[in-house]
Amino acid sequence: MADLSKARHKGFFDYLEDAIPKLVLAPTFLAALIFIYGFILWTAWISITQSRLLPNYKIASGYKITKKALENMGHNGVPETVLKELQALEKRELTNKKSRFLQNVKKQIGLEQTHKYKELILKHSYTRDPLFQYKKLFNSDRWLVALKNLLIFASLFIGLCIALGLLLAIFLDQRIRSEGALRTIYLYPMALSFIVTGAVWKWILNPNLGVEQLVRNMGFAGFTFDWLVNSKMAIYTVVIAAVWQSTGFVLALFLAGLRGIDDAIIKAAQVDGASLPRIYRRIIIPGLRPVFLSAVIILSHIAIKSFDLVMVLTRGGPGYSSDLPATFMYAFAFNRGRLGFGASSAMMMFFVVMAIIIPYLYSELRKTRYA
Amino acid sequence: MGLKLFRCCLMVMVALCIFSTSAFGGEVEVLHWWTSGGEAKSVAVLKELLEKEGHIWKDFAVAGGGGDAAMTVLKSRAVAGNPPTAAQVKGPQIQLWGDEGLLANLDDVARAEKWDELLPKVVADIMKYEGSYVAVPVNVHRINWMWANPEVFRKAGAQLPTTWEQFEVAAKKIKKAGFIPVAWGGQPWQEATVFEIIVAAVGGPDFYRRALVDADAKALSSPTMVKVLEIMKMIKQYTDKGAPGRDWNLATAMVIQGKAAMQFMGDWAKGEFTAAGKSPGADYIAMPAPGTSNQFLFNVDSFIMFKQKDPGAKEAQKAMARLILQPEFQKVFNVNKGSIPVRLGMPRAPFDDPALRAMSEFIASATGGGLVPSMAHEMAVFPAIRGAILDVVTNFYNSDMSAKKAAAELAREVEAAM
């Protein structure tokens, strides 16, 4: 009896011991589920509505003359001549304001006809359009500028950071004197926030205060370096500042990777008579593959969510020439009372991230599994 | 026994407390972003007046971002079903909040206080949702000012311009003399401020209303608009390279220090001159921007009032609405803030010269039809349309787009944002 109860007792504690990790993890799991995936879904839902100032959960709907609407009206007795005139309205966008829609109809077919067929027209032209905001988004010039800027910024930022970071890491790895001090110097920008980096580079690049003025004061009166205020070049100043800040971090990653490579392989290659560049090209850099993976993932998410740097450095300007999707989303969702429109741009950012990360992760993880 | 008695007393006291507050006064929770020195002082006046009547003022100040932060807070409170009593919201945004069905009807206060007679019709219409008052105006800022440094004009041998043709002549001279003719702040809202001033100057108030209040596509793409945009581009050659991204007060500082000759900015720029110890007329000149002398582009701050359940809070809300438009608050608030009173027929005593001039021109333009709401300062059109206009204007100004194309773009983008 005594033994049995002891065993049962032990069983309960065993069970508890097994469950503790799960119990401890459950709140964070739940929090992640709600606050990350839940809100992604919420944003997706908002993006198919016509939400303006406040969220509204009705799928975008309103009045629009479509081919199907014209057909249905024809079947229900609206004459051919009126239908032909209404056809001109097909290009108009969906509107949820009845009065505005009727106004346009009136302009097209006249007051009398509108009055006669009002009910039929309203009934058949009422449609739902979940992609309403997305269509608007891709008709917006500013969004296309933001997307193009993201492409320029992300590719240059990731490419330059990795190239410079690797180069500096290789130089630092040559067992030079006072490496610790140099490493600290390179890593130091990382200690600043993007806000500070933005403010500093704003002054350095300002043509009246910074580099341009400095060189002119040195006697080169014709020197110009006005990227910050030139709408064609402004996005490149964002690249400069971001690369300056993040290179040190990539350097640290690569340096750690380099230190992790087995000396024996390098020694063996040296015995075989391989030159130093060849050793790097054939042995060391391929050995850094996992570091490339982490660097690309970290840098690409910095690039896509990058907001503060642009806000401080250029404020998206001049004009909106250096806008990025993140600043675009903020402006429309929070400043202009177009929540649905902003949500659709946020979803597009999400899809961009997925498009980059999923194939990369897939190829990398598959290799390690079957290696 | 002792404990029981004590408990009884306590309960009576609590009951009395609840009773007394609901009988004599309620609480108003006011969301605003007037947090800087002069502004905070101005708001404190309202608090005092309300407390004198036995109501409780709960301050809900959210600083930062020119109200963006406060709006975000307000939206989350409204979504949670717990909006404050009053919030600082202005212009057509009042209609958006009205659409949500959250605003209280202030018609009985308005009738008792005769608001329809006290306020110019243009202003009163903005405060109404479907014909009923839902908001209370607080103050008026004039947008179409030109701030000039007479010393620079004298050194360059130029005349103060009253038309855009004269402006070009003067600007040429000033540039030749080695000064910056226009202190330009290269931020979208500042560029839009100059844009709307030129719209008013070139097209007059009727065209302004059609283009920037009704957002009529025909007016936006008209030859008049092309001319407006051409003038705006003409100004660009008289600005300096450091303009993009410059804050308005730094631009004002350029005029104060004599580096630049003039700036186009609302009457809040006066505060910068006053803080630098400059006196109007002698050290700086404030005059209506070229071509707009009998027009008044206004920016009116206002409080919207949310529906309340508690009768005490309702009472307090009405008292607040009433007090805001009474002469005592109007006087103290506007002297502190540097704006002018929104109600007509105020004593002129405590106001300074530029404010007095603005006051008489406010009244004159209200009757003469030159009183128009400012587009750049969110008084004329919905935020979505304002945003579309700002995008096109700033993109036009900062690129080599032609004026004709920009006007067509303006009509297209505004249509898409509706």
Image (tube, rainbow, N blue to C red):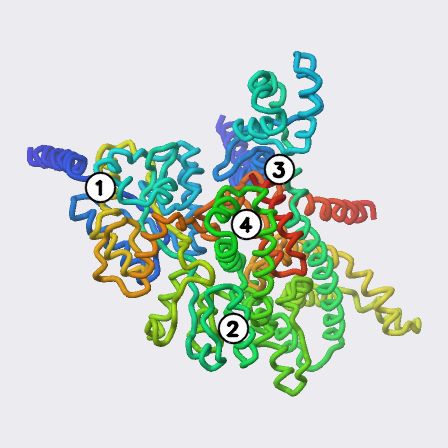
Q: Is residue A54 left or right of residue B360?
A: right
Amino acid residing under circle 2:
Ala
Of callouts 3 and 4, which one flags the residue occurring earlier in the amino acid sequence?
3
The disc at residue B41 is none
Q: CA distance from mark 2 to mark 4?
A: 38 Å
Subunit of label 2: B
Secondary element at image label 3: helix
Give the residue pinned by disc 1.
B319
Are the residues under badges 3 and 1 in a single subunit?
A: no
Of callouts 1 and 2, which one flags the residue occurring earlier in the amino acid sequence?
2
B95 relative to A191, above or below: above
Give the residue pinned by disc 2.
B170
Subunit of label 4: A
Spot occupied by residue A108 in the image (x, y as percentages of width and height): 63, 28
Counting other residues with Cα less than 10 Å from the Cα at mark 1, is it few (<14), some (14-19), or many (20 or more)?
Answer: some
Subunit of label 1: B
Q: Is residue B59 left or right of residue A269?
A: left
**Number of disc labels:** 4
